Image: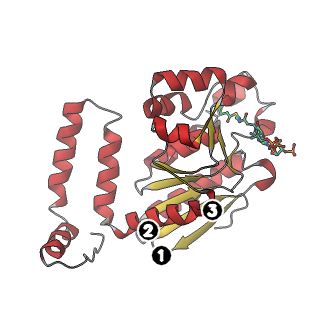
Amino acid sequence: TDFETILLERKGRVGIITLNRPKALNALNSQLMREVVSAVEELDADREIGAILLTGSERAFAAGADIKEMAPKTFSEVYAEDFFSDWDRLSSARTPIIAAVSGYALGGGCELAMLCDFIIASDTAKFGQPEIKLGVIPGIGGSQRLTRAVGKAKAMDMCLTGRNMDAEEAERAGLVSRVVPAAELLEVALDAATTIASMSLPAAIMAKEAVNRSFETTLAEGVRFERRVFHSTFATADQKEGMAAFVEKRAPEFKHG
Ligand code: HXC
């Protein structure tokens, strides 16, 4: 597939999507949205891919929705086209997706990072929901996912004042899983993605599904769901291989089935 606003490459079992609109700090226009969604769906359908890495440039993961494209839109247009709803398609991807964030992850950029399964940040990363400064509010899930990630106090603070969080605060608050020096970001994130992709693919999909279930249901239902899915891992060849390898003191060779 030919993409113009992103780069797509495969390294072993990892698919790497790089946002590539440097002149606009990777602002998310509709073409970029279509291309990211299409690339993720292509990688998600590929059984040879076990993890997806989504990243931007050193200066910006993404500085938000494209304000110049968005500015002239009318209420009837955004309502009728359900503006931004296509981004929801990322949450149906079953393959684990890591966001590697350096520089600005603002507005839609922060929301896109939060649509991924977890975020690894460089020490230069800045997260924020500055929409209020433009007279609007988050529109790609920011008010919901940020609140679940960091709690009400910080989510309200960020959405109401529009201030940024630096990487250290984001890690303390639980928005990102790790902070690494900027120069090591891609290496560390690719290493994490490669590790995930080396695991049993069914187990990785099940683990992601189980963690995500915790956001949608009660604790008792979630625990029951987890236990049933855990039981179903015993139907996979990878469970037999993983446990046999441990007993035989060797590395497992998962067949992803
Ligand atoms: C369109 C953008 C952009 C954006 C940056 N650019 N962010 N274009 N949409 N979100 C463009 C600039 O216009 C400029 O192009 C070029 O990228 C470089 O940006 P500068 O501002 O010159 O860089 P700098 O001075 O370093 O400042 C970086 C920045 C600033 C602090 C990130 O660009 C900024 O505040 N951007 C907007 C951040 C924001 O408000 N994001 C939320 C968007 S709303 P030119 O051609 O002028 O040189 C959003 C909404 C979601 O995401 C849902 C709402 C309904």
Q: Are marks 3 and 2 in contact (CB under 8 Å)?
A: no
Percent from the top left, x then y, of residue 15? Answer: 52, 66
Q: Pointer 1: what residue?
A: 12
Q: Nearer the viewer, mark 3 or mark 2?
A: 3
Q: Are marks 1 and 2 in contact (CB under 8 Å)?
A: yes
Residue depth check, mark 3 versus mark 1: number of the one nearer the observer:
3
Residue 154 visible at all: yes
Identify which residue is drawn at 27% across, 77% down. Answer: 253
Amino acid beneath label 3: Ala
Nearer the observer, 73 or 6 = 6
Query: Looking at the image, which is closer to me, 94 or 230?
Result: 230
Q: Which comes before the other along the chain, label 3 or label 1?
A: 1
Element class at badge 2: helix
Residue named by callout 3: 183
- Tell me the CA gap for discs 1 and 2: 8 Å
N-term-proximal mark, 1 vs 2: 1
Q: For residue 138, which quarter of the picture?
A: top right
